[in-house]
Amino acid sequence: MPFQKIQAEKLSGSVIKQIELLILRGILRPGDRLPSERELAEKLGVSRPSLRDAVAALQEQGLLETRAGSGIFVGDVMGSAFSEALVKLFSDHEEAMFDYISFRRDLEGMAAERAARLGSDTDLEVVDTIFRKMEAAHSKRNPTEESQLDAEFHLAIIEASHNVVMLHMMRAMFELLREGVFYNRQIMFKQRITRDTLLDQHRAINDALQARDPAGARDAVHTHLTYVENSLSDQRRSDRNEAIAKQRLEQEASR
């Protein structure tokens, strides 16, 4: 008969599975610091030796890392998403920027649609809370905080879609955006009129999500990212025209 005796799972194995799931679901993020060994063992209800075994196994997998004098942190699980050579190609070629926006438009539109259907009330409350912070930051002259909240807003929608593959893929993509690989986010927030428009677009996305309108949420994301695409295209064209104008001015001054 095809039956085998049930093997009792070691406590360290249960700890490993719990931490793995927290990382997989995006609850624990790269760089997050875990509680102290004593506190974590108490939270999990296991002995410290069992916890040490679990941590050691997770370190071997690259999911956790120990920093001397600082503690245990979630590893950079997204670090290998793109090779250094590919990241350099992205940053050196303009077409990658527009392909990136097109990719985001498709994936985030799908994520918003899923979030409106599948997100819990708490998921949508998180999205709304971040949007309210964006509104508060909008009145500040320096756009840095609003720009950062913009990224958090979009990632919160992806989290609310409850698709772990999409979540980790998009987090890796947003890390490249934060590093300025595709474009400098500050460009989008330089002008007051542009900032006003972007806030209105985020409000439309949030309103559709809170109303649990899947099609409306998807369309609002598409409208927003199409605007971003057109604005960046106009900016690139303006920069090229300015460079040509400066050459003409230099030549005229030399005559």
Image: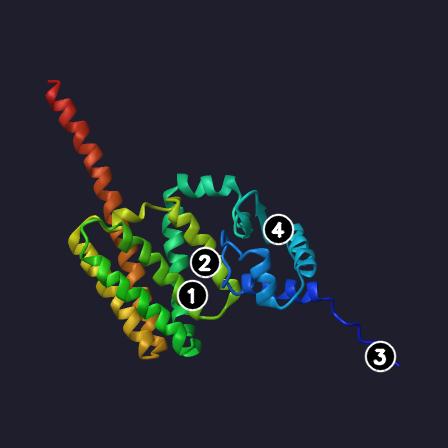
Residue located beneath label 3 in the image: 3
Taking the image as shown, residue 252 lies to the left or right of residue 207, namely: left
Does the residue at mark 2 contact the one at mark 1 (Cβ under 8 Å)?
A: yes
| Residue that extends furthest to the right in the rendered view of this protein | 1
As measured in the structure, the alpha-carbon distance from the residue carrying label 2 to the one carrying label 3 is 43 Å
Task: Name the residue beneath numbered marker 2.
Answer: 170
Q: In the rendered structure, are the residues bearing label 4 and label 2 in contact, judged by CB atoms less than 8 Å apart?
A: no
Q: In this view, does 193 lie above or below 238?
A: below
Q: Distance between the residues labelled 2 and 1?
A: 8 Å
The kind of residue tagged 4 is Gly
**Residue 8 locus on image (x, y percent):** 77, 72
* Label 1 secondary element: helix
CA separation, marks 3 and 4? 35 Å
Kind of residue sitting beneath label 1: Ile
Residue at image mark 4 = 62
User: Is 250 situated above or below 226?
Assistant: above
Please state which of the two labelled residues, at mark 4 or mark 1, is closer to the viewer. 4
